[in-house]
Amino acid sequence: MFRSRPARRFLICTALALTTAGFGDYSCAQSRLEAAYTVTFARIRVGEITATAVLGDSEYTISAQARAGGIMKVLVEGEGSFVTRGTIKNDHLVATNFISKIVSNAATYDVKMVFDDGAVTELMVEPPLPTMGIVPVSEANRRAVVDPLTAMLPSVRSGERPSEEACRRTLPIFDGRERYDLKLAFKRTDNVAAEKVYAGPVVVCSVHYEPIAGHRASAPLVKYLSEGWDMELALAPAGAPTC
């Protein structure tokens, strides 16, 4: 009964693991960043993500593919695709459309959203949102929010190494079904060496998941994530995108 929901929540959360400090200043008509990620919990591989961000002078597209892997496949089977499109205003990304499709071993979940200045104006969810045992999603929960992919890139003209301030923020996320906050706080600075990707300093943020609406309060995974599970997010410069 509950088997399919962990897969969906896991894949949404892995999409968020792509957060970086932002792109450096760019001057070409279109910039493109491609990345591949391995998601680990307690040094154990649990999933993989590939992502592509394409930025023009005034518009952007972010797409991502995520799937459970490693030990996580013992608990859930699933893969998801996500696409966000939007505009660039004052060096910040403002979503206009978000689409996701998550296929698990028990169900397929489709979401289509239209945004207007941070508010969801159109929403299509298949299968329909459940109601029994679910914290209701109000109209207020659909305002002043960001989709999971736009949350990845807070700025497109950073050009600087991430600072402690990059961790001092809250991501108000709505994925079409659930509204939750990811609260970031500075934890430490560190050095990493990822082969052929990046070697140098990173800022490590602690991440606290706070469910707000659309979730089942009694769900084991919700309790596990919200009651102090130690999550970290390392922020590094995205580097120079290709043109």
Image (tube, grey):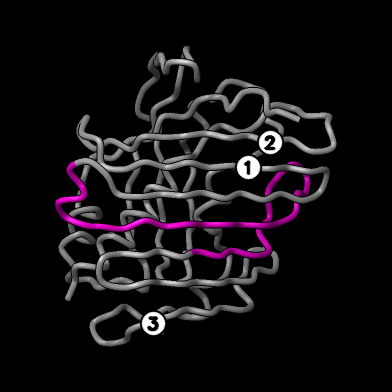
User: Callout 1, which amino acid?
Assistant: Ala
Is residue 24 shown above or below 127?
above
> Disc 2 marks which residue?
32
Magenta residues (range)? 71-100
CB within 8 Å, label 3 to label 1 = no
> Disc 3 marks which residue?
129
* Quadrant (top left, top right, bottom left, bottom right) of the C terminus: top right
Q: Earlier in the sequence, mark 2 or mark 1?
A: 2
Residues at marks 2 and 3, CA–CA distance in whole angstroms: 35 Å
Is residue 130 shown above or below 84?
below
Q: Nearer the viewer, mark 2 or mark 3?
A: 2
Left or right position of 99 against 69: right
**Residue 56 at x, y = what percent?**
79, 43
SS at circle 2: strand
Is 79 part of what is drawn in magenta? yes
Label 1 packing within 10 angstroms: few (<14), some (14-19), many (20+): many
Left or right position of 107 against 49: left
Left or right position of 62 against 102: right
Observer-nearest of 167 and 35: 35
SS at circle 1: strand
Q: Nearer the viewer, mark 3 or mark 1?
A: 1
SS at circle 3: loop
**Residue 44 at x, y = what percent?**
20, 34
Q: Earlier in the sequence, mark 2 or mark 3?
A: 2
> Disc 1 marks which residue?
53
Image point 17% across, 43% down: which residue?
Answer: 71
Furthest toward the bottom, the residue is 132
